Image (spheres, rainbow, N blue to C red):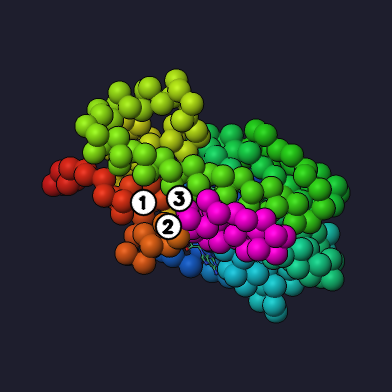
Amino acid sequence: MSNVAWIGLGHMGVPMSKHLVDAGHTVRGVDIEEGARARARENGVEVVDSIGDAVRDVDAVFTMLPTGKEVTAVLTGPDGAFAHMPEGAVAADFSTTGIETAETLSEQAREQGVGFVDAPVSGGVQGAEKGDLALMLGGEVDHVLAVERFTKLVGNYIVHVGPSGRGQAMKVVNNAMMGVAMAVSCEASVLAQRLGLDPQVFYDMVLRSSGDNWAFRNWFPLPGVVPTSPASHGYEAGFMVDLVAKDLRLAVELGTELDVTMATSKTAFELFRRTSEAGAGKRDLTSLALELGAQVDPPAAG
Ligand code: NAD
């Protein structure tokens, strides 16, 4: 069994790191929020105060943080993981950060004598809980193999896409599709509601029709139809509006760089950005339906 570090114990990090604990590994965790630390502690993560404490004597370091900014902050610099990890250990970043961040981090890791793999994931909190995420890996083969015994615990479809940054390339493209699908699923659900269609009947029919898509099926944005959708739990994240907006922004920026129109991604980005500006940035992405005028019953008094 191994010692590993896990930095970022949020919606995804808590259920993912639990699989490593359950497999018998010693997981040292770091997070800036006490609530996150407490949830991880309940799962058997040994929560520590500094990155240096977390990464000493580890075989691998895992990060699951909001954006490339936080990942860069915790991995680089004199207090960062690269500086304190044992030589030859590998850091795998499960966050969605974009290609450039992954390429830069890989270069910085090499300079410090450690490995780096970009390893973004797909499948949401439910996939994290079940350990059946899809993982898209970018980096050197040796580094990918060095973390394989851990990545297998959180994912059941794991593909080494190519060199550093290729995992992020795959993820950004996937999430452009997911973000657009979620946006149209929200507006279609509001339209269906205005037309007087019963939400359950609408949902069941779409699943057997050509409008079906992963976001709609798993994250149906009106309450009371899909029990596991955040819409059925007061729109509590899940996958936050700010994070899908970040992913769509990455896709739109790449489109600009590579001369691809990305018109629907731009529209979806604007919709989620507007939802965030209206104060729902930390709510689940399904709350776009509320921004678009969905009528839902107020939550029952607790
Ligand atoms: P989250 O905000 O719930 O979790 C991030 C955690 O990082 C938080 O607990 C936060 O306190 C912690 N953190 C922030 N800065 C830190 C720092 N400097 N040091 C230590 N901890 C710090 O986000 P999430 O939903 O778990 O998503 C994490 C990443 O995974 C994002 O890049 C997201 O785009 C991606 N992702 C999310 C989902 C999903 O369904 N939630 C699915 C696939 C991929």
Q: Position of residue 145 (x, y in %)?
A: 81, 44
Query: Is the C-beta of the residue carrying label 3 under 8 Å from the nearest atom of ligand 1?
Result: yes
Q: Amino acid at mark 2?
A: Phe
The residue tagged 2 is 272
Q: Secondary structure at mark 2?
A: helix
**Looking at this view, is 301 or 200 the one in front?**
200
- CA gap between label 2 and label 1 equals 7 Å
What residue is rendered at 67% in x and 34% in y?
Answer: 157
Look at the picture and state if 295 lies above or below 75: above
* Pointer 2 with pointer 1, Cβ within 8 A: yes
Q: Position of residue 270 (x, y in %)?
A: 45, 60
Q: Which disc, if any, is residue 154?
A: none
- Report the magenta residues as a range: 242-269
Q: Quadrant of residue 76?
A: bottom right
The residue tagged 3 is 239
Q: Amino acid at mark 1?
A: Leu
10 Å crowding of disc 1: few (<14), some (14-19), many (20+): many
Q: Residue furthest bottom?
A: 78
Q: Earlier in the sequence, mark 2 or mark 1?
A: 2
Q: Earlier in the sequence, mark 3 or mark 1?
A: 3
**Looking at this view, is 8 or 37 the one in front?**
8
Q: Is residue 236 left or right of residue 124?
A: left
Q: Secondary structure at mark 1?
A: helix
| Residue 221 can be seen in this image | yes
Q: Position of residue 208 (x, y in %)?
A: 44, 20
The residue tagged 1 is 288
What residue is rendered at 62% in x and 56% in y?
Answer: 261
Look at the picture and state if 32 lies above or below 95: below
Q: Amino acid at mark 3?
A: Phe
10 Å crowding of disc 2: few (<14), some (14-19), many (20+): many
